[in-house]
Structures are given as C-alpha cells and as structure tokens.
Image (cartoon, rainbow, N blue to C red):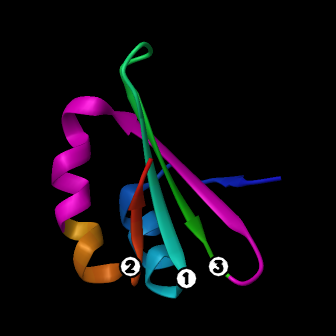
Amino acid sequence: MPIFVANEQEFLEIAKRAEECRVKRIPKKNIAKIKARTKRYLYTYKLELQNVDALLEKLKSVCKNIVEI
C-alpha cells in the first residue's frame, strides 16, 4: 500500500533516498501522480498538471532515475 505525502518539500526529501521516481500524467482528471520507490515503501504525491514541470525540474537534481509514463 503506497504512502501518500501531502507536502512537496517532504516529498523531495523522500526522493533523495528513492531508487526510482515515476511520473504519470492523467489529463482527464487534470492531475499528475509522482511516485518515489525506496527500498521499503512506495510514496505517492499528487498535484495539478500545470505544476508538474516546475516540480520535475526540482526532482531532476534529487532523484537518481526518473521515468515518465
């Protein structure tokens, strides 16, 4: 069961430990889901589509492997 994170800064701290970060855009619902897989848990963060690109720029410097689905 994934753990939902509501704070962007907290998610970026978790992404530092993540082995992989996945980005899934859902245009019908106008949201994007970003998932960070650590050794033990899967963390999920939801945000609006218009804010995804700004977060991805921050995430590129933090996460080791970013996969867009």
Tell me the crowding category of disc 3: few under 14, some 14 to 19, or many 20 or more residues within 10 angstroms, Cα based: some
Q: Which residue position holds label 1?
A: 19
Residues under labels 1 and 2: Cα distance? 7 Å
* Residue 65 screen position, x and y as percent: 41, 77
Marking on residue 63 = 2
**Which circle's residue, 1 or 2, is located before the other in the chain?**
1
Point out residue 28 in the picture as x, y percentages from the top left corner: 42, 13
In the rendered structure, which segment of residues is drawn in magenta?
A: 39-57
The reply to whether discs 2 and 3 touch (Cβ–Cβ < 8 Å) is no
Q: Quadrant of residue 26?
A: top left
Q: CA distance from mark 3 to mark 1?
A: 6 Å
Type of residue at label 3? Thr
* Circle 3/circle 1 CB separation < 8 Å: yes
- The residue that appears at 16% across and 52% down in the rendered structure is 54
User: Along the horizontal axis of the image, is 35 left or right of 28?
Assistant: right
Q: Which residue, given by chain and number where applicable, does mark 3 sit on?
A: 38
Mark 1: amino acid: Glu
Q: Mark 2 or mark 3: which comes first in sequence?
A: 3
Q: Is residue 31 left or right of 20 when viewed as pictured?
A: left
Give the vertical position of 62 relative to 31 (above or below): below
**What residue is rendered at 71% in x and 84% in y?**
39
